[in-house]
Image: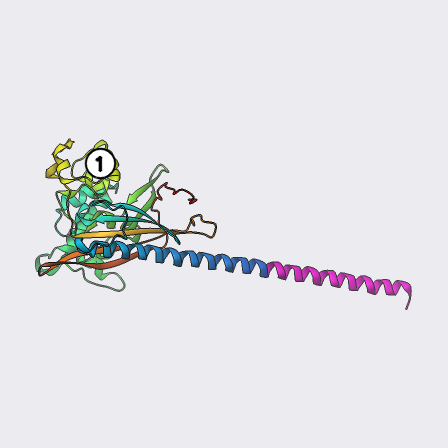
Amino acid sequence: MSRRSGNSHRGAALITVLWLTAALAIIGFSVAAAIRGELGRAENSLDGARAELLARGAIDRMFFFLASPPMETPDFVPDYRPGQQRMYWRFPGGDVLVELLPESGKVNLNSAPPEQIHAVLLSAGYPANLAQGLTEAIVDWRTTPPGGVSPLDSYYLSLSPTFRPHHASFQRVEELLMVRGVTAHLYHGGRERIPGGNVVERPGLADLFSVHGGTVPVNINSAPPAVLASVGLNAGEIQSIVAVRQRMPYRPEALVDLNLSVGPAIRVLRAGPDLAFTIKATARPRLGNGRLSDFRWTSSALVVYQQEGDRRIARIHAWHVAATTETPWPAVAAPGVPN
């Protein structure tokens, strides 16, 4: 074999080795990227599971606190004051923002007159034509029409699968999702782009209405701004009320001193005990470095008190979860705990 032939074979072998090395490097990088991706997904799943358990645990803690007789109330709910609606709890595994929201701050789906439903929707920023259509559909759903058939029945019968509206009282607020014109976005609320390009935060129907709510007066400590506006309060009064109740809930006697444009506040507002609450908990798990994860999980439970003989029993009527949430996180930090 000539020197030139030997060099040619060695050059071909070197090129082959280089190609194999490059191929193995590409495979190695691909495997490493896949492993990193799987590790990231596993970490997200772990954060989600921890956040969900933190939120549900906080709801259970608050529920057992509310369900305990006053003489037997455990001390595992720190710094709670009667009427308080927001609490910030720290656990070794993460932090939880707990909100206790009386249902009497919402408008009653079954007893509110059509004009009040329409006023609440307009105050919440719904376009006039949408507010009118939703009002008509809600009233149609809860009303028994003459002869048992309403003009809107043809809409429900055109769906797939078809169904007939109840034409009876709402049993649960979730029934709104079956009402004509109600989408999941309208029900849950959230950010929405309006004509002109601006983005606004619009409350959902579940934030405004309840089967356990009231009509007038409404609870000053939990009514959303849209509900307060619907009973005649102006923007300045609403802003002042929201700022005050975030620091300390209004007491019933404080309503006498409120100077509102609608006249005596006692006519449209109330403050006092409630028989139905939504316990809402938003959790963020703690990472290994002590900081809070960016992952948030919100769970909520509807708690209703029922009288059984001489005892008042608290029961959870419904659970709701939202893996992604826009609940604002308070700017708080404990000494030595990075936030």
Q: Is residue 291 left or right of residue 242?
A: right
Question: Measuring 24% from the left and 50% from the top, which residue is drawn there?
Answer: 206
Question: In terms of secondary structure, what is the magenta stretch mainly?
Answer: helix
Inspect the image, locate mark 1, and give the three-letter code of the amino acid beneath it.
Ile
Residue located farthest toward the right when viewing the structure as drawn? 2
Quarter of the figure that contains the N terminus = bottom right
Looking at the image, which residue is at 16% across and 60% down?
A: 166
- Give the answer, above or below, for where 318 lies relative to 188: below
Against 252, residue 17 (above or below) is: below
Q: Position of residue 117 (x, y in %)?
A: 17, 45
How far across and down, in percent of the image, does residue 236 sit?
23, 31
Residue at figure coordinates x 24%, y 49% from the top left: 100
Which residue is more in the foreground, 84 or 259? 84
Q: Which residue is mark 1?
A: 241
Regarding residue 300, the answer to whether it shows in the image is: no
Q: Check if residue 25 falls in the magenta segment.
A: yes
Whether residue 90 appears in magenta in the rendering, the answer is no
Q: Quadrant of the C terminus?
A: top left
Residue 68 image position (x, y, % from top left): 20, 56
Secondary structure at badge 1 equals helix
144 vs 292, nearest the viewer: 292
Please give the count of numbered marks on the rendered protein. 1
Q: Is residue 23 visible?
A: yes
Instruction: Estimate how packed mark 1 is, as few (under 14), some (14 to 19) or many (20 or more) residues with alpha carbons within 10 Å.
Output: some
Residue 316 place in picture, x, y as percent: 22, 59
Q: Which residues are magenta?
A: 1-30
